[in-house]
Image (spheres, rainbow, N blue to C red):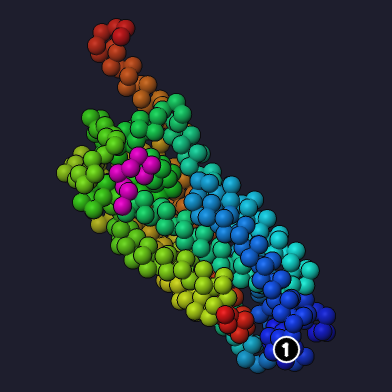
């Protein structure tokens, strides 16, 4: 493999090449990281997109110039998984600890009334506050601190091409499969609470949420990529 | 390594991963269809 | 497969998985774009549907509470006292068809219907109090 010959040879010319590659990657990452911060904040996502795309373009350019940068798939999966987890975290953190803010009581209620009455029905009636749909709170408690925060940490390690990053991304993406499976089973079982009296039942929820299937897209890659490239 | 044809192990792994994806997306589709069926029979 | 094609494969992708990885990449790009657009536009569009900027966010919040709890005396308290009890604690007015599958009896809220709802109420109040305010 070309990667291994590069490291084994280790001559000064290759050292220079390595150094330039590292710089190009860091340059691209600076754009993509600041972009991803905005993307993960939902409301400011549109600001983040051009920043992120510029970073992506820089990385592509470096790759075309023959520098050894991160594979495009690793970049996409790492950032997308982090953004997905951040977006999920915002909504659920609002519901868990900020359920009496105006933002939650307008945004979550509006979203709930339109797509999923789990965020409307008897809202803020439980002593713990927030969503009252059967099972919803339990999913939040299990998924927010475990899956999503761990997945963000794993994505950072993954982007640095660390071995633990690859391994932990596999673990947290499998968490994601469990989360999706259980969550939509719960939703289907209590569908009457979730969909009665909402503006766009069923189709609205699926259209909105289907783009969070990133773990299903990431896992086949994580299990088929040559894991020797994660050796930093 | 690059010159070799696709190895037996890779073939099996690819089959497994394709099966995994079919199961995942099949499950999602099933749940969606169940919900659509419920939608058609209830006054949501 | 000849050497040129193999050299074009991204680092870490073996020929056996080249096709699958390409499809996964397309899916990832679609998801990323969709998530960004959703994140950016959901809040403003929802706010518009429910009557902003004609209604303030707090007024929308109040209408939501009245519909949710079927209680026209509810007011959205903001800022809500920190460490206070949940705003709906002890509320028993929300209407459901109870059973193993509870079915709420509120109706879906149409496009900018909350404005109409509020205007109707204000109009009814003026007639009750007898004439022009």
Q: Residues within 10 Å of mark 1 (few under 14, many from 20)?
A: few
Residue at (46% x, 58% y) in the render: A86
Check the image and report above or below for A137 versus C95: below
Relative image position of residue A94 (x, y in whole percent) = 36, 50
Residue at (20% x, 51% y) in the render: A127
Name the foreground residue: A18 vs A84. Answer: A18
Give the quarter of the image for residue C131.
top left
Check the image and report above or below for C98 versus C51: below
Residue at (19% x, 45% y) in the render: C85
Side (left or right) of A96 relative to C49: left
Outermost residue toward the front?
A12
Side (left or right) of C69 relative to C54: left
Q: Is residue C77 visible?
A: yes
Relative image position of residue A111 (x, y in whole percent) = 42, 45
Check the image and report above or below for A155 versus C55: below
Q: Element under label 1?
A: helix
Name the foreground residue: C99 vs A62. Answer: A62
Side (left or right) of A170 relative to A31: left
Name the foreground residue: C15 vs C83. Answer: C83
Give the quarter of the image for residue C59.
top left
Give the quarter of the image for residue C91.
top left
Q: Is residue C38 visible?
A: no
The quadrant of the rendering that contains the C terminus of chain A is bottom right
- The residue at which mark 1 appears reads as A9
Outermost residue toward the top?
C131
Q: Is residue A192 magenta?
A: no
Relative image position of residue A74 (x, y in whole percent) = 61, 71
First to last magenta residue range: A97-104
Check the image and report above or below for A178 versus A125: below
Side (left or right) of C110 relative to A2: left
Residue at (47% x, 39% y) in the render: C46
């Amino acid at each position: 493999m070309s990667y291994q010959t590069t490291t084994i040879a280790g001559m000064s010319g290759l050292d220079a090449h390595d150094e330039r590659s590292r710089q190009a990657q860091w340059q691209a990452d600076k754009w993509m990281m600041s972009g991803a911060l905005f993307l993960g904040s939902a409301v400011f996502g549109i600001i983040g997109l051009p920043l992120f795309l510029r970073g992506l373009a820089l990385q592509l350019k470096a790759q075309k110039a023959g520098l050894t940068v991160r594979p495009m798939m690793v970049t996409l999966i790492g950032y997308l998984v982090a953004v997905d987890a951040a977006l999920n975290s915002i909504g659920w953190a609002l519901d868990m600890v900020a359920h009496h803010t105006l933002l939650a009581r307008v945004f979550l209620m509006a979203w709930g009334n339109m797509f999923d009455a789990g965020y409307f029905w008897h809202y803020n009636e439980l002593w713990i506050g927030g969503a009252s749909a059967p099972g919803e709170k339990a999913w939040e408690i299990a998924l927010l601190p475990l899956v999503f925060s761990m997945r963000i940490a794993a994505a950072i390690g993954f982007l640095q091409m660390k071995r633990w990053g690859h391994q932990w991304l596999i673990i947290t993406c499998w968490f994601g499969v469990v989360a999706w499976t259980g969550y939509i089973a719960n939703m289907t079982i209590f569908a009457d609470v979730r969909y009665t009296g909402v503006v766009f039942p069923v189709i609205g929820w699926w259209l909105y949420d289907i783009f969070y299937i990133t773990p299903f897209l990431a896992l086949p890659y994580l299990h088929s990529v040559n894991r020797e490239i994660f050796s930093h | 390594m690059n010159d070799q044809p696709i190895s037996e192990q890779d073939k099996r792994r690819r089959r497994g991963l394709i099966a995994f994806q079919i199961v995942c997306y099949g499950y999602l589709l099933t749940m969606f269809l169940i919900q659509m069926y419920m939608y058609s029979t209830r006054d949501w | 497969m000849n050497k040129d094609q193999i050299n074009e494969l991204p680092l870490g992708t073996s020929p056996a998985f080249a096709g699958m990885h390409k499809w996964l990449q397309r899916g990832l790009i679609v998801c990323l774009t969709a998530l960004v657009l959703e994140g950016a536009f959901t809040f403003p569009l929802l706010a518009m549907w429910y009557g902003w900027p004609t209604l303030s966010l707090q007024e929308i919040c109040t209408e939501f509470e009245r519909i949710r709890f079927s209680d026209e005396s509810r007011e959205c308290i903001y800022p809500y006292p920190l460490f206070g009890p949940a705003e709906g604690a002890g509320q028993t007015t929300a209407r459901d068809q109870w059973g193993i599958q509870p079915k709420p009896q509120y109706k879906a809220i149409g496009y900018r219907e909350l404005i109409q709802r509020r205007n109707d109420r204000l109009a009814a109040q003026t007639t009750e109090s007898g004439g022009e305010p």
